[in-house]
Each structure stands twice: as structure tokens, then as C-alpha cells.
Image (tube, rainbow, N blue to C red):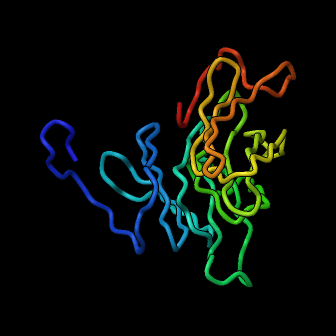
Amino acid sequence: MDAEDGDLIWKYPTADFIYATPCTANGFVYFGTYDDGIVYCLNATSGEKLWEYNTNLMIISSPAVADDKVYFGTHNYNFNDYATLKSGKIYCLDADSGEKIWDFDTDSYELQSSPAVADGKIYIGTKFIDEKIYCLDAYTGEKIWDFWTTSHVFFSPAVADGKVYVGTWEDCELLCFGGTSDNNPPLTPKEILGPT
């Protein structure tokens, strides 16, 4: 829609509903669909599809885009049938082509949190079975650290002043991570993408 007058500029039909907020970057729009688990990249001006990537998992995590890469989390495919549960994954795709660069298997079935990306690191929370905050290397997908919160993490982390902040569900706590190791968030990030 036109932000000034509300006129519809274009629309793009998908086969399933869209649960999470789209992300815009460099003239493109990135978003995922819920049950069929497809991530789309559209031209923000025309609505023309450039690519799609099928995860075969549910997507309720908004993507973050940084350094020509798209990051997002996935939900298990069928939480009503525990025999078919799959681990939720964190994905990194090439923003231009949609090709998978890496994925990371969590021990959780549900990732509703959206990633925050700062200075080559990704911060994201998990929700069910394995309630953790993960810090991954944004380029390789290798785990740098994780922390078991003992409570679901529905929400996206915020990064500021060398610390990561995230809220938990059942425990009703706001957690702050930081310290003196090299793997903490930078005191002054060059750029923060995702929730801030």
C-alpha cells in the first residue's frame, strides 16, 4: 500500500497464511508462510517474486536480513502428532538467490522468536522442550553459546550496550546476558538488524 494515501500498489497471493511480520531490505521483501513453510523474496516495488525456499516446517518467525543473508527460525511441522515432531531449525539463506547457506538444528520443536543480528552473531530464543537462548556465528551457523532459560521464549532478543535482553513466558522474567568474554555482544555494534 501507498503509505501516504493507503492505495493498494500490488498484492501477492500465497497458498497459506502469513503469521510473521515481513522484513524489507535493499528493495526486497522477505517473509514466510505458516503451514507450508515457504520463504519468499519479492521485489518491494513491483511485488514480483524473485525466489522461494521450502523448509517443510512451519514459519512463525520474522526474518532478519544482514550482509546479503536472510535468517529465520522454524516451528515443528505437526505439534498434534508427537510421533512426527521435527526439530526446529535456524536457517541462513542467500538473500539474492534463496540458496541455503547453512541450517542449525535446535533441540526445540518451536521457534517463534525472530533473530537479532549484530556484528556477525545471531541471537534467537526457543520455546518448547528446549527453552534456550542461542548465540550462533552468522557466517558459519556454529553455536557460540546457549543458555537454558527454563521457560518458553516467544519473543525476540534486543541487543544494546554489549548486552542481550530477552523476556520469558512462564517465569515472567527479563534476562540480560553480558560479561567479559570475547563472545558477548559488542559495546557499540556497527549495525543491529532485527528487533532493537
Q: Is residue 83 above or below residue 100?
A: below
Query: Disc count in the image?
Result: 0
- Residue at 58% of width from left, 55% of height from top? 112
Query: Taking 192 as reference, is 146 left or right?
Result: right
Say if 119 sits above or below 112 in the image: above
Left or right: 66, with 44 as reference point: right
Q: Residue furthest top?
A: 188
Give percent across and percent down for residue 36: 52, 73
Residue extending farthest to the front is 171
The residue lying furthest to the right in this view is 181
Q: Give the vertical position of 29 relative to 157 (above or below).
A: below
Residue at x-position 52% and y-position 63%: 52
Place of residue 168 in the rendered image (x, y in percent of width and height, measured from the top left) = 63, 45
- Viewer-closest of 97 and 130: 130
Q: Is 80 in front, or is 101?
A: 80
The image quadrant of residue 189 is: top right
What residue sits 75% from the left and 51% below the top?
Answer: 150
In depth, the one of 29 and 16 nearer the eye is 16
Front-lying residue, 29 or 112: 112
- Residue 183 percent coordinates (x, y): 83, 28
Specify the quadrant of the image occupied by residue 87: bottom right
Q: How far across and down, in percent of the image, does residue 19 sit? A: 44, 61
**Residue 152 found in image quarter:** bottom right
Q: Residue at x 71, y 82 (%)?
A: 84
Horizontally, residue 125 falls left or right of residue 137, namely: left
